[in-house]
Image (spheres, grey):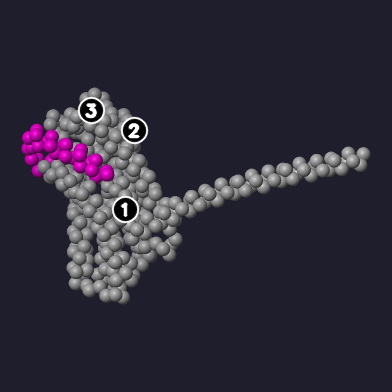
């Protein structure tokens, strides 16, 4: 193993599941003793999430990317960035699946340990930030429509996306600094965090506040204002279609946010309990450690499922996405049929020309023999 860090876990019952912001590291060296057969079903789950997330998010990028610019909605820009973040994230899952299958042994070296953990952390931050932006966009579209011309312009949306990516990349930096490969008693290495750093523990709590609690507060305020607006707003015949479009878009964004909340809330709660108890030097009994460890393992898998949930939501709820996907599939099929037709027509024309050529040759040969 490239790097070893010994002496970080001196307590026999210290189930400190890699106190970090990415759940892929939430299998400690004790984890395989806590969940029987986890080295079988956790890798299987990771590979299923990988295939579903890779194909689904790639499909979203292709469908929306091929949509004509004049037919794109502003929210599609955030959807594209969400799909891109999830697509990059799922590419790291095969490594974590291999590690989980080898009882948490990390065979890929310290470099990939840091990079993969960094990608997971950036994915989590960018997801919640883009979801917050989508909620603010829905708020502006429903509540502050007349005052949001600049904020809902294409230029402002693109600038916002750049700011989100920069902030996510910066906030994920501690995963690069405090990520290590710990050599265990059986000489195998585990990709985990340096829990001895008080600064890193404080950063974890700070990022939980900045990247989960604060965004969820903003999202709640936005949707609270939207619901109050929709209840007090009387729909007239002239704007009924526009109101229906707003409600439909609102339902999709709300479903995406709900899926994210269900996926990530258990992990954030358990992780916060883990860090606070460690910072306060609270004495937890063995059963509490075991339950906390099991919860972190299960909540980690649940958090990963979110990376493949959004494409399914678009497909089932977004009729605009379904129409674009159907149009793209029809274009591909018609292109394939056109190619086959072209090949067939070329084959027919070539065979016809060959027949004509051979007939002409026989005619010239016959005429020559007649002359002779």
Instruction: Report whether residue 267 is seen.
Output: yes
* The C terminus, quarter of image: top right
Left or right, 262 with reference to 333? left
Residue 254 percent coordinates (x, y): 24, 58
Residue for badge 3: 184
Residue lying farthest to the top in this orientation: 186
**Sequence-wise first label, 3 or 1:** 3
**Sequence-wise first label, 2 or 1:** 2
Q: Which is nearer the eye, 100 or 235?
A: 235
Image quarter for residue 68? bottom left
Left or right, 84 with reference to 17? right
* The N terminus, quarter of image: top left
Tag 3–tag 2 contact (CB < 8 Å): no
Q: Is residue 149 above or below residue 187?
A: below
Number of callouts: 3
Foreground mark, 3 or 1? 1
Q: Is residue 199 above or below residue 45?
A: below
Image quarter for residue 135? bottom left
- The structure residue drawn at horizontal position 23% and vertical position 32%, both measured from the top left corner, is 38
Instruction: Report whether residue 218 is seen.
Output: no
Q: Which residues are magenta?
A: 278-305
Q: Is residue 229 above or below residue 325?
A: below
Name the main secondary structure of what is drawn in magenta. helix
Foreground mark, 2 or 1? 1
Q: CA distance from mark 2 to mark 1?
A: 38 Å
- The structure residue drawn at horizontal position 9% and vertical position 37%, both measured from the top left corner, is 288
Q: CA distance from mark 3 to mark 2?
A: 16 Å
- The structure residue drawn at horizontal position 22% and vertical position 53%, both measured from the top left corner, is 258
Residue for badge 1: 316
Q: Which mark is residue 108?
A: 2
Magenta-drawn stretch contains 4: no
Magenta-drawn stretch contains 286: yes
């Amino acid at each position: 193993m490239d790097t070893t860090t010994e002496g970080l876990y001196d307590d026999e019952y210290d189930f400190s599941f890699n106190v970090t912001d990415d759940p892929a590291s939430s299998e400690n060296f004790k984890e395989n003793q806590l969940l029987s057969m986890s080295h079988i079903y956790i890798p299987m789950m990771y590979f299923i999430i990988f295939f579903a997330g890779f194909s689904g998010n790639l499909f979203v990028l292709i469908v929306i990317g091929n949509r004509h610019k004049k037919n794109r909605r502003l929210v599609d820009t955030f959807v594209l960035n969400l799909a891109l973040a999830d697509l990059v994230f799922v590419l790291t899952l095969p490594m974590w699946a291999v590690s989980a299958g080898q009882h948490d042994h990390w065979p890929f070296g310290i470099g990939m340990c840091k990079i993969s953990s960094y990608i997971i952390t950036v994915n989590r931050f960018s997801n919640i930030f883009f979801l917050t932006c989508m909620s603010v966009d829905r708020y502006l579209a429903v509540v502050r429509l007349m005052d949001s011309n600049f904020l809902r312009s294409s230029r402002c949306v693109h600038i916002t996306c750049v700011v989100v990516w920069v902030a996510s990349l910066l906030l994920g930096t501690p995963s690069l600094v405090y990520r290590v490969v710990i050599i265990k008693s059986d000489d195998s290495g585990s990709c985990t965090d340096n829990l001895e750093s008080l600064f890193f523990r404080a950063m974890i709590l700070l990022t939980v506040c900045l990247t989960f609690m604060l965004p969820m507060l903003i999202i709640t305020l936005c949707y609270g204002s939207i619901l109050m607006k929709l209840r007090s707003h009387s729909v007239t015949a002239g704007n009924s279609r526009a109101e229906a479009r707003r409600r439909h878009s609102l339902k999709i964004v709300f479903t995406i946010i709900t899926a994210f909340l269900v996926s990530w809330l258990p992990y954030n709660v358990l992780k916060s309990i883990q860090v606070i108890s460690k910072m306060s030097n609270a004495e937890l009994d063995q059963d509490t450690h075991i339950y906390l460890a099991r919860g972190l393992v299960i909540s980690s898998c649940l958090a990963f499922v979110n990376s493949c949930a959004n494409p399914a939501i678009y497909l089932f709820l977004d009729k605009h996405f379904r129409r674009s996907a159907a149009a793209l599939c029809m274009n591909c099929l018609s292109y394939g049929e056109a190619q086959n037709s072209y090949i067939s027509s070329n084959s027919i024309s070539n065979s016809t020309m060959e027949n004509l050529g051979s007939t002409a040759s026989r005619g010239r040969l016959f005429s020559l023999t007649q002359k002779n």
